[in-house]
Amino acid sequence: MIEELSVKTRESTELINLTAEVQAVVGKSGVKNGICIVYVPHTTVGLLINEAEPGFQFDLMKVLDRLVPQQASYRHPDGNAHAHIKAGLIGSEKHFIIRDGRLVLGTWQAIFLCEFDGPRTRSVMVKVMEG
Ligand code: ZN
């Protein structure tokens, strides 16, 4: 089973918590034990597992801005090289274990889409497999 979620981002950079949406896809699949793959088919978006605490989210974006400034002597012509680099650092996919019909996540773990070149409409692919 593959489901495509559509996510509208509102800011140029932001983190959007997708945990409930991904869990809903797992629930709908009926799979009790298996694997869930979440993948974003974009070059300026990342997929992150981390804490759903606003201070952390601010800190992460601040650190990424410091590491990868918006303006630098980039060769990429679109003016969004920083967004591509940040997305590359974060990565585009995650795998999850499904146990008893639920994603196995730590107490503080949440799944985030990391927008680095918004606002845009983004796709999130969710594949659920039994096993
Ligand atoms: Zn570009």
Image (cartoon, grey):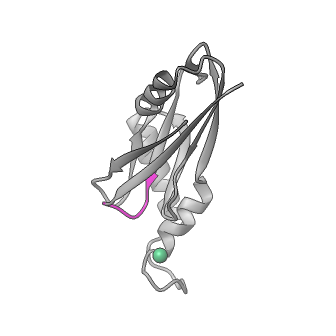
Residue in view at x 58 percent, y 53 percent: 92
Q: Where is residue 22 in the image (x, y as percent from the top left)?
A: 47, 33
Give the residues in magenta. 114-119
Residue in view at x 44 percent, y 74 percent: 80
Of the 4 image quadrants, the one containing the C terminus is top right
Asked if residue 114 lies left or right of residue 9, the reply is right
Q: In this view, does 94 lie above or below 120?
A: above
Numbered disc total: 0
Q: Position of residue 109 (x, y in %)?
A: 54, 29
Q: Where is residue 118 in the image (x, y as percent from the top left)?
A: 34, 61
Considering depth in this image, is 73 or 77 the residue closer to the camera? 77
Q: Residue furthest front?
A: 1
Q: In this view, does 54 lie above or below 27?
A: below
Residue in view at x 44 percent, y 72 percent: 70
* Principal secondary structure, stretch drawn in magenta: loop
Asked if residue 109 lies left or right of residue 7, the reply is right
Considering depth in this image, is 92 or 50 the residue closer to the camera? 92
Residue 85 magenta-highlighted: no
Whether residue 66 can be seen here: yes
